[in-house]
Image (cartoon, coloured by chain):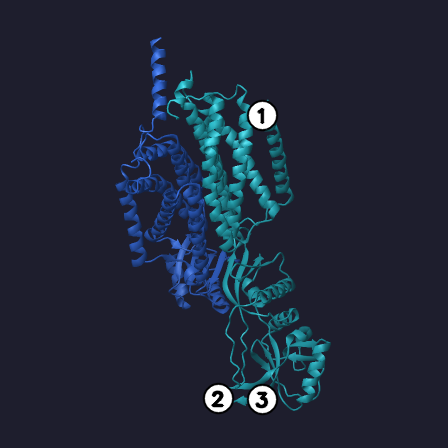
Chain colours: A blue, B cyan
Amino acid sequence: MAKDKTEKQQIKQQQQIITDRSLYKFDFVGKRRIWFLVSTIIIIAGIVLIFVRGFNFGIDFLGGNLMEIKFKQNVSVTELRKVMGDIGYGSAILQSTAPDQYIIRTVPLDIKEKTKILDNLDQKIGIVRPLMQDRNVAAGFSSQIIKNALIAVAISIVGILIYIWIRFEVRFAVVAIIELIHDLLILLGFYAITYREFNSTSIAVILTILGYSLSDTIVVFDRIREEIRLTKKDSFYDIVNYSENKTLARSLGTTATTLFPVLILLIIGNQTLKDFAFGLFVGIISGNYSSLFIGSPLLVVWNNKFPKYKK
Amino acid sequence: MKQDKVNITVIIIFVIIIGLAIWSIFTYPIKLGLDLKGGTQVILKATQIQQKETSSSTTSASSSGNVSSDAIDKAMLIMLNRIDKLGISEPLVTKDFNNNIVIQLPGVDNPDKAVEVIGKTAQLEFKIVEGYDETTRTYKLGPTLLTGDKLASAKAGYDNNGQVVVEFSFNSEGAKQFEKITSENIGKQLAIVLDGEVKSAPVIKSTISNNGVIEGIGSLEEAKDIALVLQTGALPVNLEIQEVRTIGPTLGQDSLRQSLIAGIIGFILVVIFMIVMYRGLGLISFIGLCSYVALLWGILSALKTPLTLPSIAGLILTIGIAVDANILIYARIKEEMYKGKTKIVAFREGFKNALKAVIDSNVTTLITAAALYRFGTGPIRGFAVTLALGIIISMFTSIIFVRAILFLMLNSKIITPGFIGVKILKNSNPKAQSQKEQ
């Protein structure tokens, strides 16, 4: 009988925890200054590095030739550099992808120059044809890619802004866009900090994150919108925290399930896939982080300055 | 019970659609993009043909402005014709958002050469020589009297001296004009100009009507190329190669294999995760996910969109999105049950409350997918299509299909709190739920 009573009490307690908006496990909003600081530091570090060292641009942006060659035998970088130097391409960038496999990056090549390089490599080391990959990009081609990407980013931002404005309120829309820009800056910052090659894959990744990173935010916003309607008693601070806690399981769950395949690509994938997975990995985590620690707390900050809901 | 009928109908319709999707997968096997099967992609920028006047006259080259869409379409047709004559199978010639011409050639042995032939302008012109500039060692030429579009045929061969030449003959209109030109200019030199370069300038000895030769060619191979491009006609635009990208077959296969492995392992991990978190509901979501993948794959097959690396990335990402809708709903159902609601109320409320979040978060992603499709190039477009389709299909499977299955099961004894992964609720207290809700 006594046991039954404690169980009933437990149930009641549990239900109270669930329904009382001022009882929540994690105070996301309270520690906002720390999170804002963390983000600011990463973003500033990224921006400083972008200006000081710049991105490690790939041939998509600089123009140039990239060949991935499988040799008939293992070859060391020094050996390969010597062969390339002998025919006047000592400044080529060599990257080993396997003991007998190299990516060779040079300035843009015409057919004659390319034939000369390949024939020499074939004579002195022996290469397997057809090549694994071969790209030649004219300098200046990237201006179009960048222009298109910027248009896509701008249109997306405006579209999302309008949609959230209609479905929520203007302050939600503005905060969402701030978050989006935050995620993009973090992602760009990571490219600068890790000095990973920035190429057309990176552009695709950035555009992907642009579309995806807000989904966490929208889910939290949706919950806040719902809770606001249900209560007049609780403070906005509590509502935001409560909503974040309520959606936390889903946020982490979704992030985990999205990250599984990305992580595996990062581990087993070839260079192109790794590039893709790296950006997605950073972007997804940043999107999740910013929706929990940046976006929703910003709503509280906004409400403190321009109160619309109970402070 | 009426509700049950609706649910059963929904399930039957979905099963039929999934069946169609599976049929489509086997009927139209999905095509692989160049980055997965290997091949060459060339991006060419079209510019206005510059009149290379070697004469001293003041007609300077007109700089490249915007090239008309018509000219580009015509150029694409001509190039397709040339590719055909080169014997390359399954080529793809398309135009991108920036009016660049994108040529895709699967598995070519010597991509560089093919590209050179395909992109050659092949502007053949006949002009009368008006003088010779000793300092620049160039001919002073008169206006263009006749062009290569009046040719009937062209073929490589040797002249009497054993030199490589390209023999050509005019069509009837061309022959008439050529006769007029030669008869009026006997004794003068006639320059045969190919792409701005004077190939030869023989003296006109008598009236010629229907044929001639182009001299000054390096090799028989080059002569064959010239004959080929002359036969297919001159391009109405100049083409600048922006990018040539060749992926060898091994690299493509590696990429395909690795991304499939990642997709499958990811899928399995997702399913395990869902079952651990949501027990029986996780199993149901597995059915939902499988039907999602079948539907998406089936539609991609039917649309004949080639599968590329970016679209695989899109596929993998949308698996995450598809699960997300389930997680949102299940998390909400669990929460409603913890609040003390009965399972039927909890399921209804859970679906209802989660719906808005599912739609709102997916619409924002759809907006981006639309922008990507409109302004993206090549592979990015493929990615946008996968992403958009994935979002729409996943909403259908999780909101309609999975819902119908769950609600049909709801009346049975299978669905217990344990089935959902909810531990308490031996005795649900209906009063508890109404306490705070007002």
The residue carrying pointer 2 sits among few (fewer than 14), some (14 to 19) or many (20 or more) residues within 10 Å by Cα, namely few
Percent position of residue B351, x then y: 48, 30
Q: Is residue B3 above or below residue A137?
A: above
| Disc 3 chain ID | B
Q: Earlier in the sequence, mark 1 or mark 2?
A: 1
Q: Give the residue furthest to the bottom.
A: B187
Mark 1: secondary structure: helix
Alpha carbon separation for disc pair 3 and 2: 16 Å
Residue shown at the point (37%, 18%) measured from the top left: A11
Residue receiving disc 1:
B3
Q: Earlier in the sequence, mark 1 or mark 3?
A: 1
Give the residue type at disc 3.
Glu
Mark 3: secondary structure: strand
Percent position of residue B285, x then y: 51, 31
Query: Which of the 4 quarters of the picture holds residue A233?
Result: top left
Q: Earlier in the sequence, mark 3 or mark 2?
A: 3
Q: Nearer the viewer, mark 1 or mark 2?
A: 1
Q: Which mark is residue B130?
A: 3
Q: Nearer the viewer, mark 1 or mark 3?
A: 1
Residues A211 and B25: in front is A211
Give the residue type at disc 1.
Gln
Residue receiving disc 2:
B135
Q: Is residue A240 above or below residue B184?
A: above
Q: Is residue B14 left or right of residue B309?
A: right
Q: Give the residue furthest to the top.
A: A1
Residues A68 and A281: in front is A281
Alpha carbon separation for disc pair 1 and 2: 94 Å
Mark 2: secondary structure: loop
Discs 1, 2: same chain: yes
Percent position of residue B436, x then y: 37, 25
Q: Is residue B159 above or below residue B257?
A: below
